[in-house]
Image (tube, helix red, strand yellow):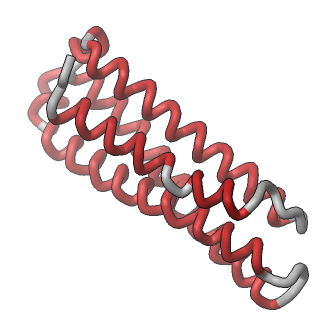
Amino acid sequence: MQDFLLSAYLWIKSLHLIAVIAWMAGLMYLPRLYIYHMGAEKGGEAEKNFIIMERRLLKGIMNPSMIAVWLLGIILLVAQPQYMTEPWFIFKFLCVIGITGVHGVYGGAYKKFLAGERPKTDKFWRICNEVPFILMIIIVIMVIVKPF
């Protein structure tokens, strides 16, 4: 099995990176939709459209991408288990857990928007818009530079 994983490693890594890009795009776009949603009239046509867009983004792109990132990442780790003890990898992994937590916050907020609530403030969602990007920068540096 390990031989097969090593021979397919670059393909698996490519698919992993594609899933990361799709996930990150959603993580940076969904809070922007939430900001616009906050300004929409409750029960109005715009709010209904935002609910549809948010659902499609979350369930059609973000959730499948996150699952693919985790599954492909685990497969990559099975192929290269020595990474688990590297400090750069441990820090990177903690950042991935952080991004997954952000995803969970976004999903919880979607349920509240769906129920007609307006969770948090515009300012909160504007700040949230930056968190995945900052974590992504750290992750890329950890993977490429391996500073420690």
Residue at point 41%, 45% (across, down) = 134
Which of the 4 image quadrants contains residue 137? top left
- The image position of residue 73, as x and y in percent, is 34, 34
As drawn, 52 above or below 112: below
On the rendered image, what quadrant is the N terminus found in? top left
On the rendered image, what quadrant is the C terminus found in? top left
- How many numbered circles does the render carry? 0
Q: Nearer the viewer, residue 38 or 57?
A: 38
- The image position of residue 59, as x and y in percent, is 61, 61
- The image position of residue 24, as x and y in percent, is 42, 55
Residue at point 36%, 52% (across, down) = 19
Residue that extends furthest to the front in the rendered view of this protein? 123
Residue at point 52%, 34% (across, down) = 98
Which of the 4 image quadrants contains residue 116? bottom right
Q: Nearer the viewer, residue 111 or 147?
A: 147
Residue that extends furthest to the top in the rendered view of this protein? 85
- The image position of residue 96, as x and y in percent, is 44, 34
Q: Nearer the viewer, residue 98 or 76?
A: 98
Residue at point 13%, 41% (across, down) = 10
